[in-house]
Image (cartoon, helix red, strand yellow):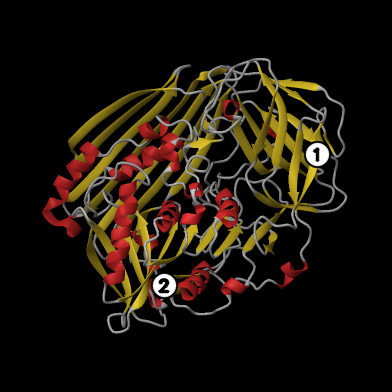
């Protein structure tokens, strides 16, 4: 049964909307939409800021209008700002999370706090990019910023984002995300917002906005480039209360644990079964009344209402029950659980030692196992940051398991719950100086179905850290540790744990230059630790979240339905693997402005068995805007390949007015590989 969302069009306060230009210290103006309680000019209210590059007046117009009026209707000024160089704002956005972005945010917050409708208190709210910069701006300590809600974000830009995975290039997402921003940044502002300047601003963006992937690949280790904007470098810099929210199905969940451990001030954590979406909208469900939960946070920290939210357990998680593997679920069965803080003294590690194809509860004798691995291992890994689409999650992993070394435990006699990070200690040798290891934790049912619970990847040249990698000495055994993604899972009686190990994980991990054979020593040197959580009697008494609510969205009509498809094609005779991932946003007509918005994007991944240098990723996109005789669109193409020593990148950008091409530019870049 699907979750239902109550759509509201009446609130305690009548809501008005206005547009504004917010000046920055260097004279650049940022475009803002502001939803206000009608009485705010007479009775000033706190403000909530969402600060994003995702074009508030077209591509995000419908979604923004489903929650900003909600906050305004409950007594807050809700402000949505396009980051410099995006949407209706002036300037150029040269990269993610630059100091310029933070400086502008400080100016925006100061401007908001000075408005006659604002009480002077400001909160920051956002998912993904907006969750990132909420934490980053909090670390700059603007005095007006009183609280943050950060959803599906990270405190460590190198460890947990779309660029690198355990020191490996994130092949499935690095180029793809760069290409999506390449497409979005190439779009012009709307003439209804900026007037006749729109074309001049457009040409400046087309000419000056770079493909971000170049900078990302030029920094293949965790250097100062990645430390900037990674608030884990100094948690103490954040004094504002933080509510950190994540979902087990998403790629941005590990940071919730680190933030709860590291932040010294008031904090809460919440993890549900959700993908990369707001918890009142996300799949898998159950969805919750997240907008109501946000209001409780804002009421406490922006209005000073003692509503008991900080008297509740600090950390609340959805512990997922075992299910039949599927690439997506409407709901994941399970139950809510809570801990007073993190790390929890209640969590005890259970250790399993690797034996010959077996996980032992006692140390077994040492044997040596080897695996060369298939370049096709990882094809059914799902996507790194699922958004609730039908193919996002790993399906039954039996085929994947067959391409790996596997170690099976005995069926458990009683159900076991884990919450936290599984960790693998591994004694491993490689016949190549560059190699990686991918590991997965699985729940195997009595009938053999293999459900992925967690994964971890490590570039073995990064075995001692991500800042100063060193090549392996072929044939030498190393003791390494692989920290798997955090999980909250209940293994039922009769099921067993499985650990799968491989030297390949395409397309998530860009393959090593040469196919590597790994040798693993079992026995005392190789063990798996699982964070076992004993039952907590108070879990059954946790208050239920309210049902989801949202606003009536901005008036619009769908002229073509969105479509997502993912196909995997394996040619046995040619020994090739190709993955096609299509995202067609359809066409949306915003009836209040007469604007039509459309977009289409496709990723293509290819590799040949036993030939890691054949790996390639290509991304094609199209996006357009149309109103009356104003008709503009951009077409983009990006491709990434590699040889043993370099990555090669090509990007092509074409812009059109009607059927006339008004801009064309091609970029080529050759970037050395640095132990990846």
Q: Are marks 2 and 1 in contact (CB under 8 Å)?
A: no
Q: Which residue is mark 1?
A: 352
Rate crowding at label 1 as few (under 14), some (14 to 19) or many (20 or more) other CA atoms within 10 Å.
Answer: many
Quarter of the rendering occupied by the N terminus: bottom right
In percent of width and height, residue 202 lies at: 19, 45
In the image, residue 665 above or below residue 483 = above
| Mark in the foreground, 2 or 1 | 1
Q: Is residue 531 visible?
A: yes
Which residue sits at x=60%, y=49%? 328
State the SS at label 2. Answer: helix
| Mark 2 and mark 1: Cα distance apart in space | 49 Å
Which residue sits at x=23%, y=31%? 665
Q: Quadrant of residue 442?
A: top right
Which residue sits at x=87%, y=31%? 364
Front-most of 393 and 483? Answer: 483
In percent of width and height, residue 86 lies at: 28, 50
Q: Which residue is mark 2?
A: 70
Front-most of 332 and 112? Answer: 112
Which residue sits at x=70%, y=21%? 477
State the SS at label 1. Answer: strand
In the image, residue 282 above or below residue 117 = above
- The numbered disc on residue 164 is none
In percent of width and height, residue 658 lies at: 19, 43
Q: Is residue 658 visible?
A: no
Rate crowding at label 2 as few (under 14), some (14 to 19) or many (20 or more) other CA atoms within 10 Å.
Answer: many
**Quick one: label 2 or label 1, which is nearer the N terminus?**
2
Front-most of 51 and 26? Answer: 26
């Amino acid at each position: 049964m699907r979750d239902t969302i109550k759509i509201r069009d009446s609130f305690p306060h009548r809501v008005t909307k206005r547009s504004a230009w917010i000046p920055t210290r260097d004279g650049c103006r940022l475009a803002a939409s502001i939803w206000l309680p009608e009485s705010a000019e007479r009775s000033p209210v706190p403000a909530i800021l969402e600060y994003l590059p995702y074009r508030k007046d077209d591509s995000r117009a419908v979604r923004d209008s489903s929650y900003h009026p909600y906050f305004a209707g409950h007594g807050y000024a809700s402000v949505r700002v396009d980051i410099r160089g995006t949407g209706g704002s002036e300037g150029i956005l040269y990269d993610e999370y630059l100091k310029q972005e933070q400086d502008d945010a400080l100016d925006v917050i100061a401007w908001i706090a000075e408005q006659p409708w604002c009480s002077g208190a400001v909160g920051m709210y956002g998912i993904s990019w907006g969750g990132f910069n909420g934490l980053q701006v909090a670390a700059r300590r603007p005095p007006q910023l009183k609280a943050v809600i950060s959803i599906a974000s990270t405190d460590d830009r190198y460890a947990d984002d779309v660029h690198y995975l355990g020191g490996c290039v994130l092949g499935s997402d690095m180029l793809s995300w760069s290409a999506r921003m390449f497409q979005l940044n190439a779009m012009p502002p709307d003439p209804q917002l900026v007037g006749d300047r729109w074309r001049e601003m457009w040409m400046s963006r087309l000419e000056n906005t770079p493909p971000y992937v170049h900078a990302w690949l030029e920094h293949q280790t965790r250097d100062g480039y990645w430390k900037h904007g990674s608030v884990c470098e100094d948690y103490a810099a954040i004094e504002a209360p933080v509510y950190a929210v994540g979902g087990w199905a998403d790629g941005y969940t590990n940071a919730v644990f680190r933030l709860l451990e590291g932040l010294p001030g008031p904090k809460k954590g919440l993890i549900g079964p959700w993908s990369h979406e707001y918890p009142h909208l996300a799949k898998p469900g159950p969805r919750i009344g997240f907008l109501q939960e946000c209001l409780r946070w804002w009421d406490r920290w922006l209005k000073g209402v003692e509503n008991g939210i900080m008297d509740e357990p600090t950390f609340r998680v959805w512990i997922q029950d075992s299910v039949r593997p599927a690439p997506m679920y409407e709901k994941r069965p399970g139950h809510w659980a809570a801990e007073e803080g993190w790390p929890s003294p209640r969590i005890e590690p259970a250790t399993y030692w690797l034996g010959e194809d077996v996980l032992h509860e006692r140390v077994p004798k040492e044997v040596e196992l080897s695996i060369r691995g298939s370049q096709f291992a990882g094809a059914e890994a799902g996507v790194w940051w699922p958004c609730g689409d039908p193919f996002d999650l790993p399906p039954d992993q039996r085929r994947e398991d067959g391409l790996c070394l596997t170690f099976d435990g005995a069926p458990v006699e009683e159900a076991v719950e884990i919450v936290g990070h599984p960790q693998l200690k591994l004694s491993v040798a490689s016949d190549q100086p560059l190699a990686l290891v991918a590991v997965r934790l699985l729940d195997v049912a009595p009938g053999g179905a293999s459900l992925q619970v967690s994964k971890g990847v490590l570039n073995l040249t990064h075995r001692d850290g991500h800042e100063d990698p060193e090549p392996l000495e072929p044939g030498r055994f190393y003791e390494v540790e692989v920290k798997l993604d955090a999980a909250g899972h209940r293994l039922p009686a009769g099921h067993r744990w499985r650990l799968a190990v491989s030297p390949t994980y395409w397309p998530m991990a860009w393959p090593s230059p040469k196919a590597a054979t790994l040798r693993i020593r079992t026995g005392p040197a190789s063990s798996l630790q699982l964070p076992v959580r004993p039952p907590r009697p108070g879990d059954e008494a946790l208050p239920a979240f309210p049902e989801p609510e949202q606003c009536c969205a901005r008036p619009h009509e769908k002229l073509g339905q969105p479509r997502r498809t993912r196909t995997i094609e394996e040619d046995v005779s040619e020994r090739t693997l190709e993955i096609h991932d299509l995202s067609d946003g359809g066409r949306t007509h915003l009836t209040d402005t007469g604007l039509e918005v459309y977009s289409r994007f496709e990723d293509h991944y290819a590799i040949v068995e036993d030939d890691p240098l054949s790996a390639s990723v290509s991304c094609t996109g199209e996006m357009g805007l149309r109103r009356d005789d104003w008709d503009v669109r951009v077409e983009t193409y990006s491709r990434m390949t590699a040889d043993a020593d370099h990555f090669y990148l090509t990007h092509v950008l074409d812009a059109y007015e009607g059927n006339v091409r008004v801009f064309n530019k091609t970029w080529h870049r050759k970037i050395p590989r640095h132990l990846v």
